[in-house]
Image: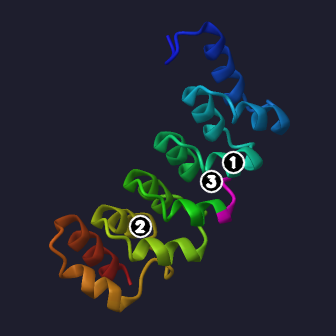
Amino acid sequence: MTENGSANTVGLVAEARYYKTSARRLTKLAQHESAEVRTAVAMNDHTPAALKRLAGDKKASVRGWVAENSNTPQESLVILARDKDADVRMEVAGNYMQPRETVEILDNDKNAQVRSRLLYFHQGSSDACSVERLLEMAGSDSAAERCSALRHLTCR
């Protein structure tokens, strides 16, 4: 069963995931009380307007799915790159469609795992980090960050 035990919620989740559900209907479902329904909307690739709304959702799990969606509007990704929840920022770091501004924000993230994920997903990109920043990260206390930085430096 779903979080509130409703069979109706199961149907709404299926509707929200369906690729032919209209943008208008998805925008309405993005306002549903159930986080499961809102998450299903966030997973749907055909819903940029609803994704913009869900970028401000109260549940971090919903914001995380928005951050992961390649069709999330770039201005929403910039907002999510500053999210209080590190898991949300990690999903932004792994989104290939993020604008340069989010790369700059995440490159300076206080969480080493966010910075490492940014490097991992943008290894071939000159946007990921400056050489100076990579050298700084190579001396980090975080083994994951050192590894990512060194891997990125050797690919240049």
Q: Quadrant of residue 120?
A: bottom left
For label 2, the crowd category at 10 Å Cα-Cα, with few meaning under 14, some 14 to 19 and many 20 or more, is: many
> Which residue does the image show at 32% across and 70% down from the upper left?
110
Position above or below: 14 against 97: above
Nearest the camera: 132 or 54?
Answer: 54
The residue pinned by badge 2 equals 118
The boundaries of the magenta stretch are: 70-75
Residue 31 seen in render: yes
Q: Secondary structure at mark 3?
A: loop
Residue count near mark 1 (Cα–Cα under 10 Å), binned few <14, some 14–19, many ≥20: some
The x, y position of residue 139, in whole percent, is: 18, 82
In three-dimensional space, the C-alpha distance between marks 2 and 1, rounded to whole angstroms, equals 24 Å
Q: Earlier in the sequence, mark 3 or mark 1?
A: 1
Judge depth for marks 3 and 1 and give the one in front. 1
Dot 2 or dot 1, earlier in sequence: 1
Callout 1 secondary element = helix
Give the prevailing secondary structure in the magenta stretch: loop
Instruction: Measure the alpha-carbon separation of dots 3 and 2.
Output: 15 Å
Q: Tell me where residue 75 sits by quadrant.
A: bottom right
Q: Is residue 152 magenta?
A: no
Q: Name the residue tied to disc 3.
A: 70
**Numbered circle sitting on residue 53:** 1
User: Where does residue 43 sit, x and y in percent of width and height?
Assistant: 61, 39
Sequence-first disc among 3 and 2: 3
